Image (cartoon, rainbow, N blue to C red):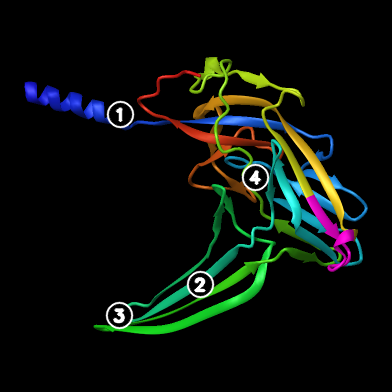
């Protein structure tokens, strides 16, 4: 009997020691340079329209740039920067990207087929970068064809990989746009005596800031022009943001589960949705372990 009790207590201990609970730190931002519209935060002048959407885990500075003119526009990534609290992250990093694809078909007793396509990308300063919109110029491509025969079945597979180099000057055609992938906005939690790190519903509080007291300033600089070789004539777009509010939430107060619908048809399974998502906001998700000693 004692052995069963000891076993039960051991199981409870192991489960409690391994258990984690998810929390979210929510950041809200403001800017005098953009307008909040359904498509995102928009900066616009006579030449271009720039659309931002920060909503992502750790934030996302990626942006879309649309050419409003009748001429090509050239974006200089060597002169374009994301500046966080005064520290500049230059968009051009001279990176190499690889795209791969493979497929296979089996013949015999049964016939099946599968297809996979993925992009291997770089990690920059701990932040995810997918290179879309700034990676081009094919360097090398590899293709292969192989056949494997087994009893009553023959499998044929095919694949290739394409490596590309990041460009420092990106051309945007007239009346078109491109997406530029950026950097994360915050890589660690904000800690404050007025914020519980692992709050219950009744302990959710908000820390507010002004433009002068904010813990995070975000400046995005985009250099562009109408002549690829005349760098001295490039113009510069500068948009400033700052964090105005930070709050910590337990997962049940930050997300909800519901059945997706499309054209009047409801899905069979629920999906999780964020309650506070918006282009001027971002979050950091984190866990509470069993050995946490600080409440704030």
**Residues at badges 3 and 1 in contact (C-beta under 8 Å)?**
no
The residue carrying pointer 2 sits among few (fewer than 14), some (14 to 19) or many (20 or more) residues within 10 Å by Cα, namely some
The residue carrying pointer 3 sits among few (fewer than 14), some (14 to 19) or many (20 or more) residues within 10 Å by Cα, namely few
Numbered disc 3: secondary structure:
loop
Give the Cα separation between the discs numbered 2 and 4: 27 Å
Does 137 appear above or below 202? Answer: below
Residue identifier under label 2 = 101
Q: Earlier in the sequence, mark 2 or mark 4?
A: 4
Residue 229 among magenta residues: yes
Which residue is depicted at the point 90% across and 59% down? Answer: 233
Which residue is depicted at the point 92% across and 66% down? Answer: 70
In the image, farthest residue toward the left:
1
Give the Cα separation between the discs numbered 2 and 3: 26 Å
Residue identifier under label 1 = 17
Give the Cα separation between the discs numbered 1 and 4: 33 Å
Residue identifier under label 4 = 60
């Amino acid at each position: 009997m004692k052995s069963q009790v000891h076993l039960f207590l051991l199981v409870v201990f192991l489960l409690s020691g391994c258990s984690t609970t998810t929390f979210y730190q929510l950041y809200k931002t403001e800017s005098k340079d953009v307008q909040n519209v359904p498509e995102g935060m928009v900066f616009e002048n006579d030449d271009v329209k720039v659309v931002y959407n920060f909503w992502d885990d750790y934030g996302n500075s990626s942006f879309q740039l649309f050419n409003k003119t009748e001429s090509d526009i050239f974006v200089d990534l060597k002169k374009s920067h994301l500046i966080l609290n005064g520290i500049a992250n230059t968009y051009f990093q001279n990176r190499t990207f690889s795209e791969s694809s493979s497929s296979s078909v089996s013949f015999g007793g049964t016939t099946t087929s599968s297809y996979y396509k993925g992009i291997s990308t770089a990690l920059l300063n701990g932040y995810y970068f997918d290179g879309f919109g700034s990676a081009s110029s094919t360097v090398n491509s590899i293709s292969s064809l192989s056949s494997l025969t087994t009893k009553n079945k023959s499998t044929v597979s095919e694949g290739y990989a394409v490596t590309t180099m990041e460009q420092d000057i990106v051309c945007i055609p007239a009346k078109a746009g491109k997406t530029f992938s950026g950097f994360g906005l915050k890589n660690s939690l904000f800690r404050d005596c007025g914020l519980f790190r692992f709050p219950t519903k009744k302990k959710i509080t908000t820390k507010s800031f002004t433009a002068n007291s904010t813990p995070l300033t975000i400046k995005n600089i985009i250099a562009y022009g109408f002549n690829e070789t005349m760098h001295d004539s490039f113009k510069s777009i500068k948009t400033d943001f700052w964090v105005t509010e930070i709050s910590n939430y337990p997962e049940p107060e930050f997300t909800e589960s519901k059945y997706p619908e499309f054209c009047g048809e409801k899905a069979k399974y629920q999906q999780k949705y964020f309650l506070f998502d918006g282009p001027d906001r971002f979050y950091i998700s984190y866990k509470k372990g069993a050995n946490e000693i600080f409440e704030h």
